[in-house]
Image (cartoon, rainbow, N blue to C red):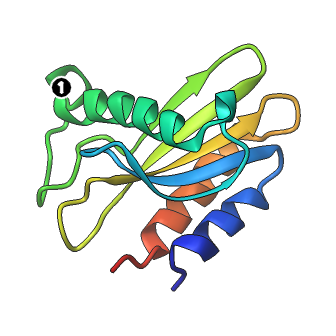
Amino acid sequence: MPGIDECLLEAMRLPGARGASLVDWTSGLALGTVGEAPGGDHETTAAEAAELARLAAEHGAFAAGGTQDGRPPVEDVIVSNHDSYHLLRFVDTSFDSSVFLHLWLGREEGNLALARIRLGDMASRLVLG
């Protein structure tokens, strides 16, 4: 079972991966980063991605199925722009499940469907603590 560094390095092996991080969406802090960051600053990117994750996880419009066992009701969030994709994948943890994996993919080289499947697998195997 991989830890943070191994998980992020595995994410960077995905086609088109530009950068990856593990972020606490409660505090907005990056717990680990690898590769590039949009805009060049991993901490700013983590804080901004945390706002988006918090919005999706805490607002009823995105939580139609409800929540179970204190986990966020949303599995992932995908944001696309003209040249890239951002995939935020929530991670179930033994504590408060307030972390997510953020993968930044180049649009031309990346495979969004493959990235979503692999990130889900990585999130289920990730060991924190």
**57 relative position to 29: left or right:** left
Residue furthest out toward the right: 109
Q: How many marks?
A: 1
Image location (x, y in percent) of residue 74? 31, 40
Q: Is residue 80 above or below residue 4?
A: above
Residue in view at x 83 percent, y 50 percent: 15
Residue furthest out toward the top: 82
Image location (x, y in percent) of residue 77? 45, 34
Amino acid type of the residue tagged 1 in the rendering: His
In the image shown, does 116 or 59 lie closer to the viewer? 59
Image location (x, y in percent) of residue 113? 67, 42
Residue in view at x 69 percent, y 47 percent: 19
**1 relative position to 84: left or right:** left
Figure quadrant of residue 5: bottom right
**How dense is the environment of label 1, judged by Cα within 10 Å: few (below 14), some, or many (20 and up)?**
few
Quarter occupied by the C terminus: bottom left
Residue in view at x 31 percent, y 44 percent: 25
Q: Is residue 107 above or below residue 103?
A: above
Image location (x, y in percent) of residue 46? 47, 40
Q: Which residue is mark 1?
A: 59
Residue at disc 1, secondary structure = loop
Q: Is residue 67 above or below residue 125?
A: above
